[in-house]
Amino acid sequence: MSELHAVDQRPWLKHYPEEIPTSIEYDEKPIHQFLKESALQYPKKKALHFMGKEISYDSLYSEVQQFASYLQYLGLRKGDRVSIMLPNCPQSVIAYYGILQAGGVVVQTNPLYVERELEYQMKDSGAKMIVCLDVLYPRVTNIKGKTDLEHVIVTGIKDYLPFPKNVVYPYIQKKQYGLIVRPEHGGDTHVWEDLMLDASGIVHEVDIDPKEDVAILQYTGGTTGFPKGVMLTHYNLVSNTQMSDAWLYKAKKGEEIILGILPFFHVYGMTSVMNLSIMLGNKMILLPKFEVEDVLKTIQKQRPTLFPGAPTIYIALLNHPSLQKYDLSSIEACISGSAPLPAEVQEQFERVTGGKLVEGYGLSESSPVTHSNFVWEKRVSGSVGVPWPDTDAKIFKPETTEEAEPGEIGEIAVFGPQIMKGYWNKPEETAQVLREGWLLTGDLGYMDEEGYFYIVDRKKDMIIAGGYNIYPREIEEVLYEHEAIQEVVVAGVPDPYRGETVKAYVVLKENKTLTEEELDAYSRKHIAAYKVPRIYEFRTELPKTAVGKILRRSLVDEEREKLAQSNKTTS
């Protein structure tokens, strides 16, 4: 299994344009070194734009130094874990690079976590410090005593708002959350504004081995069992960021503007927005949450050129009733990840913006990107594209390590410099997915004769109904083509007779109507009878992760709970 493809056995390489190298000489340096280099090269250039406030590269680097020095003053040692529980804001960028500069390991934490989830992640990671938003401070204090947390650093959105927004925001916050939190600076609680004044700015240099030392613990979604901490080294992150740069070869260093909607606590936003932007000396527009009208206004006013996102983000923009009022023509390139990109969405978004939107593929364990369609060259609709530079990929036949033939469905395995070191404190789980450097992704797919890869579905999402293997993604693609459907997800739900049955959850476009009978007739016209959903449920919205991935498993869990309740009632 350790054997790599010989170069002539990688059919995808013949499609590479001459501008994209098939192999790259990666920098063996810490990921935070990129910020120092950009600050030296572009000191007065704007690095961040946040709700009207802008921060230059030299100011950003200075604040990172301040923060790093304070962490070392608190006793941070090399390898200590520090959690960041923030939305996209200047503090999330400063904390990220500051922790790494001080020698720490970043633990990315979703601000939406409830106490149970937060407690689990803090215990599992052994984090000694956490940086959190003021409205989350009560949540953190409630679980702190059950964890290894020694220090809590508290900041607020208002801390980096321009006048008069910084004065007004606390009142907005009180109305929105029902509380204003004013922690005192002292003891084990540290208020951002005060600590940044107290910090010396003198950082003791920490010796980092980029290939061995872990930079971040990126927790998986936990859709099967408990979330696992993915150990990504500095070299993993540097290599994937440099691959991103090579893929977007038309992007001009120091001139692009990247729209930061994808949350930085998600690995895709961290690499494709934050690390790439900092490496290139570009400007990031930070949006703390996804609100469609705000995004449309921001694009028109700030004129971003690069817009990494997820299908649900693009779908929401395209279906906004006021879309035609806004000029989105600044957008030149977008790589979509986290979920399948429907062809309809791709075509419509490109018509509206005049830019390019292509589908890519990756996972937390690969920093995250392994495949993508070419932005400006040949692309294949329905395919996630081809492997990135220095990335090898194979399809293994089910439950074997035998390589499948082109067109044959099996499990996707990937190999490259961006593949994780392993799962934090979970050697058995690591051994299950890492085999001599190859990462078994858990995704089912196939490669065509040309070397383009296709995702059929997650292994765990495949539906077995009436003895047939049914792939939800295939059905979703067909349903997305219906003019009345805005979003759809298909899942296998418990069925006492067939084992599982196919159910479609549908969100309609505004002012569109569709009956179950009409949708069933449409499905039967376009899908083989055994794949046609037996149940349709119309909803106003679907459950999603922070990055916009639809939570299929939570819908299945709902069905199981309903069935359990029904069985209790009838017994």
Image (cartoon, grey):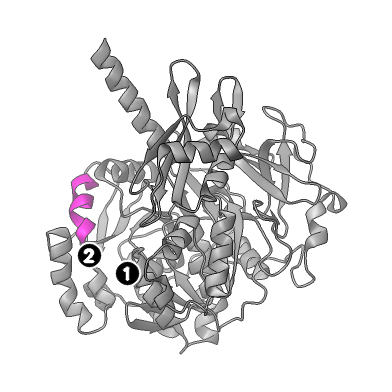
Does the magenta portion include 436? no
> Can you tell which quarter of the image residue 115 is in?
top left
* Residue 25 spot, x, y in % from top left: 72, 66
Task: Quickly name the residue at label 1.
Answer: 70
Query: For the residue marked with disc 1, what is the amino acid?
Result: Tyr
Task: Quickly name the residue at label 2.
Answer: 190
CB-based contact (under 8 Å), mark 2 and mark 1: yes
Q: Which residues are magenta?
A: 135-144
Residue farthest toward the top in the current orientation of the protein: 571
Does the magenta portion include 140? yes
Looking at the rendered structure, the secondary structure element under dot 2 is strand
Res 371 seen here:
yes
At 46% from the left and 90% from the top, the residue drawn is 44
Looking at the rendered structure, the secondary structure element under dot 1 is helix
Query: For the residue marked with disc 2, what is the amino acid?
Result: His
Q: Mark 2 vs mark 1: give the one in front.
A: 2
Residue 554 relative to residue 489: left or right: left
Q: Measured along the vertical axis of the image, is residue 316 above or below residue 356?
A: above
Task: Tell me the quadrant of the picture where the N terminus can be found.
Answer: top right
Q: Nearer the viewer, residue 458 or 320?
A: 320
At 43% from the left and 70% from the top, the residue drawn is 204
At 55% from the left and 48% from the top, the residue drawn is 365
Residue farthest toward the right in the current orientation of the protein: 8
Q: Measured along the vertical axis of the image, is residue 545 above or below residue 555?
A: below
Q: Nearer the viewer, residue 482 or 22?
A: 482
* Residue 317 spot, x, y in % from top left: 43, 65
* Residue 200 spot, x, y in % from top left: 32, 77
* Residue 291 spot, x, y in % from top left: 34, 65
> Can you tell which quarter of the image residue 470 is in?
top right
Please give the label number shown on residue 183: none
